[in-house]
Image (cartoon, grey):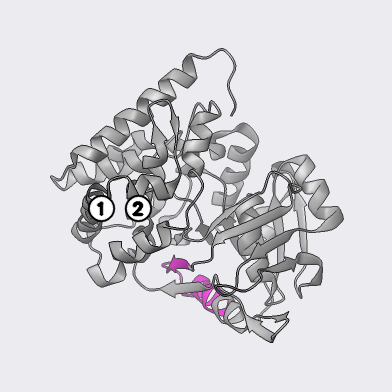
Amino acid sequence: MSHYNILILGASYGSLLASKIMFGGHDVKLVCLPEEAALINGEGFRVRMPIRVGKEPVLIDSRNLPGKVSAAGPAEVSPADYDLIGLAMQEPQYSSPAVRELLDRVAKSRVPCMSIMNMPPLPYIRRIPGIDTDAVREAYTDPSVWNGFDPGMLTLCSPDPQAVRPPEEKANFLHVTLPTNFKVARFDDEAANNILRQIEKDIDAARVNTAEGLSELPVKLRFHDSLFVPLAKWSMLLAGNYRCITPDGMRTAQEAVYANLAESRSIYDFVIDLCVALGARREELVPFDKYAAAAKGLTRPASVARALNNGARNVERADKLVQLLASQKGMRHPAIDQIVELVDRRLAANRRQPSVAV
C-alpha cells in the first residue's frame, strides 16, 4: 500500500478530512494560525462524529490514528514535499498575503490539488465545457490568486459533511453535525486519480471500537469520473445556507428551508436544472426530498450567515457564481437574484463600518 504525505490548508474543516485520511496511515500537515498550530502540535486534534441514529457519537483522537498529524503556518511549508494538497479554507482567506504566497507556491509545485471549498476555484470552472470563466470572475474575492494553476491538476471535492467547532471546546476540536460523504471529481492526471482511489479504499476500511464492537465510520470519500457530481452542493447552498441570511440577522438552515418549503424546492430544482444545462446528468445530483430530510437536523445558521453577522467584509459568493453561470445559459430565478442583492447589501454595510472582523 502506498504511503502519502498530504498538505491541507485550513485546520477547522480540514481536520475532518485529515481524520479520515490518517486512518489509512497517511501523514497530514495542516496549515493554520499559530495558536491552532501550537495546539495541534502539542495535543493533536479531536473529531466527534455520530455513527448511527440513537447511538453515542465516537470521539476520534488523532494521537491514536495510524497516520501522523502536524501543523504549521503558511510560510513554513514547501508544497513540493507533498503528494496531494487539500484546500479547505473559505475562498476569501486565499487572498490574505501569507496564504496567497503559499497558494502561488502550490500552483508552481504542480502537486495535485483537491479543493474542499463551497466555492469552486476558477481553474475548476475552466474544466467545465462551454463556460466563459472571465464572466464569473466578479464572484471571487480576488480571482488572480488562481492564475497560476493548471486546471487539470486541480479538482473539486464537495464539502457535504457539516461540522462546527463547539464554543466550549478548544480550537483543535470539531463536532460533525451531518456525517455525509465527500464526493470528489477526477483529475485529468491518472497518477493523481490513483491517489484519490487509494485514499477512498483506506477510508472504507477504517473501523473504530464502540461498546458494540468494531464499527465502520460515516463520512467516506467517493471518487467520481464526472466533473459535475461535486456541484450537487450548489442546490443545498442556495436553498439553505444563503437563505440563513436575513436583512438584519440570521436564522437556522432548518428554518431557511422550512419557512417556505415550496420556494426552497423551486430554488433547489432551478440550480439542479442549471447543473444539467452545464453538462451534469440529473441522476448524479441529490434530489430535493433527500436534502430536505437532512435539513431537519440543520439547527444552526450556516457559516456564511454567521460571518456576515460578525462583520465580515468578504464571504464566499457561491450565490453570485450560480447567478452568473445561470445568466450564461439564459436562466434566472427571482429568489436567487434577491439572495445576491441581500448579500451585496449586507457586505456593503459591513464595509462601511470602521472596525470589522475578517
Q: Which part of the image, by quadrant, shows the C terminus? A: top right
In what element is the residue under mark 1? helix
Q: Which residues are magenta?
A: 182-198
**Which of disc 1 and disc 2 is earlier in sequence?**
2
Q: Residues within 10 Å of mark 1 (few under 14, many from 20)?
A: many
In what element is the residue under mark 2? helix
Q: In the figure, is residue 137 to the left or right of 98?
A: left
Q: Residue at the front extreme?
A: 54
Q: In the figure, is residue 175 to the left or right of 286?
A: right
Residue 67 is inside the magenta segment: no
Q: Is residue 167 visible?
A: yes
Residue at x 79%, y 41% (from the top left corner): 35
Residue at x 51%, y 30% (from the top left corner): 309
Residue at x 64%, y 57% (from the top left corner): 175
Task: Looking at the picture, tell me which residue is in the foreground, 134 or 164.
Answer: 164
In the rendered image, the vertical position of residue 215 relative to residue 321, given as above or below: below
Where does residue 337 sit, x and y in percent of width and height?
A: 24, 35
Residue at x 58%, y 45% (from the top left corner): 103
Amino acid under disc 2: Trp
In the rendered image, the vertical position of residue 301 relative to residue 352, given as above or below: below
Task: Looking at the picture, tell me which residue is in the foreground, 221 or 143.
Answer: 221
Label annotation for residue 271: 1
Task: Tell me the residue that label 2 is attached to.
Answer: 234
Amino acid under disc 1: Val
Q: Which part of the image, by quadrant, shows the N terminus? A: bottom right
Q: In the figure, is residue 97 to the left or right of 305?
A: right
In the rendered image, the vertical position of residue 13 relative to residue 62, given as above or below: above
Q: Are marks 2 and 1 in contact (CB under 8 Å)?
A: yes
Q: Gap in Å between the C-alphas at discs 2 and 1?
A: 7 Å
Q: Residue at the left extreme?
A: 330
